[in-house]
Amino acid sequence: SCTTRENPSMMKPESQPSASNCTWKWFVQSLDHFAPGVTANGNATFRQRYCIYDKYWAALHKRGRPKPIFFYTGNESPVEEYVNNTGLMWELGRKLGALLVFAEHRYFGASVPQLKGVPNCVAYLTSAQALADYATLIVHLKSELHAVNAPVVAFGGSYGGMLSAWLRMKYPNIVSGAVAASAPIFGFPLTAPRLDGASVAITHAASAQAGSQPLCVHNLRAAWPLIRALGMTSQGRDMLSEAMQLCTPLRSAADVSTVLQYFQEPYFALSEGDYSFSSAYITFALLGKTDPLPPWPMRAACDKVSADWGVQVDGNVSDVRFGIRVGNVSVVVDWNETQVKSASVQDILQSGVMRLFRGVADAAAVWYNVSGDHKCHAWGPAQRRTSNTLREGHRKSPQGRASSEVVDTAVAGAVCTTNTMVSAWDGICCNEGLNLVIYLVQGVGNDLFWPPNVERHYTLKDLIGEPGPNVCAQVFAKQGLYGMATQSDPWSQWDDVYYGGRSIEAASNIVFSNGLLDPWSAAGVLRNLSSTLVAVVMPNGAHHSDLFFARESDPACVTQARRTEEHYIRLWTGACDVL
């Protein structure tokens, strides 16, 4: 047994370490770890950037044991983002005297290989190559630092959490254990995830059970069909435009459909970033803004739309056959169709629907107006960017041609013509078919969204499709970037084979943590798979809440998650007796 000691003091914000504390170094990696001498670039290399911090680390042995190395498996952003936000590594590193290493993922940040003039320059953009980078770097550091016996613990969140778990699975001789936070490894099609799992988790975050106001989900679910109904007439669209403070008035039914999507989009981000503290982590990742969301942003949004406006819903909501009444305004919903009982302008104004619509707009402003300087909602498709970073590469790829202009992507040794790397995350998904599908379905009766985005009797096969020409390879080729896989793998068959799908019980020493407020928890490991594959569930946690610096506002479940992780790290590293 290994007893976890209480942390004597959490780091105050002004004393929290950051990228400025790093010693920044470069390591020369092979561009291709798996076929050197065979491909045109078999002997090519690139420089990988990493941060190293050794102030906590004592190279001296204690009872014959070296101090541990904590290694962050960088994901789909410049590595500074993870250096600045992975407080768990810094705090446990200080307690356990660990060497801290944060490695940047190939093709991201400053670790982009030479592209121009290189044949098939993006063929090497895969998670397997990235894992080989990390394993090679660890071996180099242990040799260089004369610490070949130092135990290594991998840390990562989101895609980085997937990488940390996979690093332990693929290189157990190099990594002693891994903390895989919010790692959606069970999100591939062949792992049979719930296709509306993300939407169900979002709805949970907006529920009273998760701390939001009781009427939030009820009012939102009713608002969407009412917006559609009022938007069927020119006069109704004018009323909506005013009530919802739209920068550009609604002119058509198509505009109304776009506005419905616009006002529903923020809930993924608000759920993902539903932290107990004010944070710019999600806004920076998705919007490139440093303006922070408020503490508990989902609750803040729900506060705007939780008044009792007399909204009545009857019928079978779970089957998406129900009626809505607000005063004399009523709508009948049958899947994605609505029937509207005629209502006068006076009826509409005397009901609570206009106040409901204003509440919906104000709720969305928690996300869209995070900077506080917008006077109206810019709802046009070209005016907004909300999508989650992981989701961007996980959309179903249309089969066939991307456009009327066909680019030949199958030319052997096609030489890249640019040094500008576009959307490396999409490149990973394109190359290996990394396809997470838990967000593909919404509005089918289990969540707060409407209308349904699928047919009533949809199947997984309907949504995933069949392998075919890889349209994304054409998109990259049009940019002068060659080497992407020319055939798509929408079922993620290779990732399922390579990483084990749901059959990972042979692995060991991994803690999988998930916050149930996070949409990605629907693809996470939520139960223990063995005595050494441990699930840590945080009912009031969001996207890798446990990886951040500890705060007084942390829910008890997040604090307990960190204690559990520390317990297992001590076991893996032989540090049970370290105070």
Image: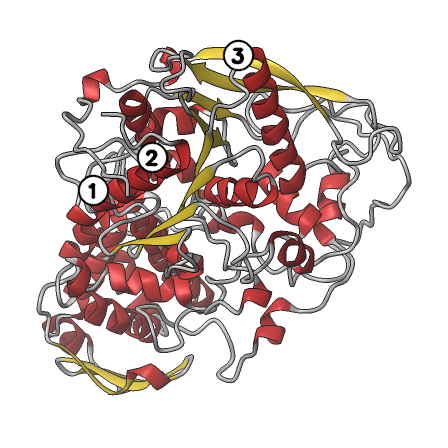
Quadrant showing the C terminus: top left
Question: Label 2's element?
Answer: helix
Which mark, by number, is residue 110?
Answer: none
Which mark is in front, 2 or 1? 2
Q: Where is residue 324 drawn, in percent x and y?
A: 23, 82
Which mark, by number, is residue 559?
Answer: 1
Which residue is denoted by mark 3 in the rendering? 145
Q: Of callouts 3 and 2, which one flags the residue occurring earlier in the amino acid sequence?
A: 3
Which mark, by number, is residue 570?
Answer: 2
Q: Where is residue 443 drawn, in percent x and y?
A: 39, 72
Q: Are marks 2 and 1 in contact (CB under 8 Å)?
A: no
Taking 428 as reference, is 224 left or right? Answer: left
The kind of residue tagged 1 is Thr
Label 3 crowd (10 A; few <14 / some 14-19 / many >=20): few
Q: Residue at x 61, y 60 (%)?
A: 396
Q: Nearer the viewer, residue 388 or 251?
A: 388
Mark 2–mark 1 Cα distance, whole angstroms, equals 17 Å
Mark 3–mark 2 Cα distance, whole angstroms, equals 22 Å
The kind of residue tagged 2 is Arg
Question: Label 3's element?
Answer: loop
Mark 3–mark 1 Cα distance, whole angstroms, equals 33 Å
Label 2 crowd (10 A; few <14 / some 14-19 / many >=20): many
Quadrant showing the N terminus: top left
Question: Label 1's element?
Answer: helix
> Which quadrant of the figure has residue 490?
bottom right
Q: Where is residue 211 drawn, in percent x and y?
A: 15, 57
